[in-house]
Image (cartoon, rainbow, N blue to C red):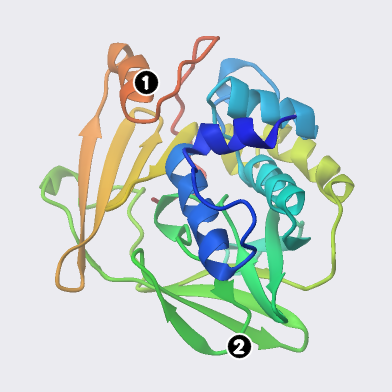
Amino acid sequence: MDIEAYFERIGYKNSRTKLDLETLTDILQHQIRAVPFENLNIHCGEAMELDLKAIFDQVVRKNRGGWCLQVNYLLYWALTTIGFETTMLGGYVYNTPANKYSTGMIHLLLQVTINGRNYIVDAGFGRSYQMWQPLELISGKDQPQVPCIFRLTEESGIWFLDQIRREQYVPNQDFLNSDLLENKKYRKIYSFTLEPRRIEDFESMNTYLQESPASVFTSKSFCSLQTPEGVHCLVGFTLTYRRFSYRDNTDMIEFRTLNEEEIEEVLKNIFNISLEKKLVPKHGDRFFTV
């Protein structure tokens, strides 16, 4: 695997030697704007592999994306390769309908230490929940970013990531009741501890998430990609674009329903993805908002 090939894939041309917060932020932003958060392999009849070489081949050589276990593992490799002090952590994702966090450790995130300060780095949550900058590991501090205000809080060794969202405006009234709309202004995202993890800790969950009928990832096909102003999301046949803060304290979400012939074109032109196998778009009944 070639670190320069990774940097070329994400379009990063800046410092590889300055191990500071500016460099870390720059790499994160390049990755989330180049590498989609997506699970399309499942809906093309292929596996979501956890082997690093397979992930590198998928993301870097085949110009694809992946879900958190893949894209954050790749980011972990890239950051450690150039010298950042990086640790894998495991997260428990908040389930809004059930009003609780997942019992299984289904999310991989990173901690990066710079000059004695710890930061949470995550390139694999996607949609409007995706951080655009590393979050300093400080409890109770509001950390405003373009997508929203993020907040980390700690209770008895467990950390919680939440966000405070803007109002939202949907021009197409037909989609005001879409199940893809996030309606909570204060949104819980996930919990985690600072216990270091290895990629092997996620192997059984990687299998479960792509095989279980109870998994949102088998229920829905999705692809999301950040832009300098917002985020594109494709869920089943529904394409959305959220423009952050298009007016004071308000995001705008535009909806469009695609036909089967348009899917391939949208994947190529918006997400820069060309699939090797036929995608079967799916919009199941599992909770998933954009």
Secondary structure beneath label 2:
loop
- Front residue of 55 and 264: 55
Residue at image position (70%, 54%) is 108
Q: 177 above or below 39?
A: below
- Front residue of 10 and 274: 10
Residue at image position (61%, 86%) is 138
Q: Is residue 38 visible?
A: no
Which residue has dot 1 on it?
Answer: 268
Quadrant position of the N terminus in the picture:
top right
Secondary structure beneath label 1:
helix
Residue 36: x and y in percent read 48, 38
In this picture, residue 29 sits left or right of residue 194: left
Q: Quadrant of residue 181?
A: bottom left
How dense is the environment of label 2, judged by Cα within 10 Å: few (below 14), some, or many (20 and up)? Answer: some
Q: Which mark is residue 139?
A: 2
- Of the numbered discs 2 and 1, the one sitting upstream in the chain is 2
Residue at image position (68%, 42%) is 74
Q: 73 above or below 137?
A: above
Residue 98: x and y in percent read 57, 63
Amino acid type at image mark 1: Lys
Amino acid type at image mark 2: Ser
